[in-house]
Image (cartoon, rainbow, N blue to C red):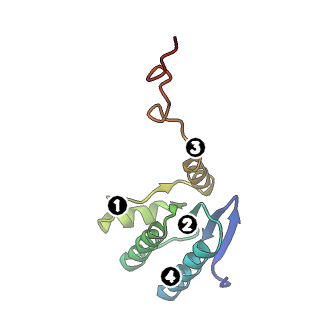
């Protein structure tokens, strides 16, 4: 891991705490680290925590979105947490408000979101109808 990129594995979740000083080199390193972690470890999802990030310009916002797409293409769920109001306003002003990304207010909510996605759901469509085809005489 790079000194400036902090990541942890918690309950098979890759938690990445982004540094406040983002630039192109940082994102290139981040992409490589995350994609290698996804390929080499048992991971159920990725939480990208932006709580330290104060400013996000158009290029860095696009890099953020590209990273989410890369994670998705690898077959994993991701959630972005900790966006500051200033960053959210910037994303809206840049027209990046109608994207298919999942965000949660904080790290705990992001972790819960990914973990809940992994819980098996009981669907009535999957239930077997015991009355059909079971003639008992």
| Total tally of numbered discs in the picture | 4
Q: Earlier in the sequence, mark 3 or mark 4?
A: 4
**Circle 1: element type:** loop
Residue 30 against residue 69 in the figure, above or below: below
Q: Residue tagged by mark 2? A: 48
Q: Earlier in the sequence, mark 3 or mark 2?
A: 2
State the separation of the CA atoms marked 1 and 4: 20 Å
**Circle 4: element type:** helix
State the separation of the CA atoms marked 1 and 2: 16 Å
Image side of residue 75 versus residue 44, left or right: left
State the separation of the CA atoms marked 3 and 1: 27 Å
Q: Are marks 3 and 1 in contact (CB under 8 Å)?
A: no
**Circle 3: element type:** loop
Q: Position of residue 120 (x, y in %)?
A: 57, 43
Can residue 18 be seen from the camera position used here? no
Q: Closest to the observer: 66 or 117?
A: 117
Q: Residue tagged by mark 1? A: 99
Q: Residue tagged by mark 3? A: 120
Quarter occupied by the N terminus: bottom right
Q: Residue tagged by mark 4? A: 27
State the separation of the CA atoms marked 3 and 4: 34 Å
Q: Where is residue 34 in the image (x, y as percent from the top left)?
A: 57, 75
- Crowd around label 1: few <14 · some 14–19 · many ≥20 (10 Å): few
State the separation of the CA atoms marked 3 and 2: 24 Å
User: Which tag is nearer the camera, tag 3 or tag 1?
Assistant: 3
Q: Position of residue 70 (x, y in %)?
A: 45, 73
State the separation of the CA atoms marked 2 and 4: 12 Å
The residue furthest left is 95
**Circle 2: element type:** strand
């Amino acid at each position: 891991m790079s000194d400036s990129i902090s990541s942890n594995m918690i309950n098979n979740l890759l938690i990445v705490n982004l540094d406040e000083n983002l630039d192109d080199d940082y994102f290139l390193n981040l992409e490589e680290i995350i994609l290698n972690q996804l390929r080499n470890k048992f991971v159920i999802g990725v939480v990208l925590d932006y709580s330290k990030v104060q400013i996000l310009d158009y290029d860095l916002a696009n890099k953020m979105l590209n990273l989410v797409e890369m994670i998705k293409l690898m077959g994993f769920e991701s959630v972005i947490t900790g966006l500051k109001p200033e960053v959210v306003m910037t994303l809206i002003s840049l027209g990046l408000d109608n994207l298919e990304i999942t965000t949660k207010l904080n790290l705990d909510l992001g972790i819960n979101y990914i973990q809940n996605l992994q819980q098996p759901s009981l669907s009535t469509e999957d239930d077997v109808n015991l009355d059909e085809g079971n003639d008992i005489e």
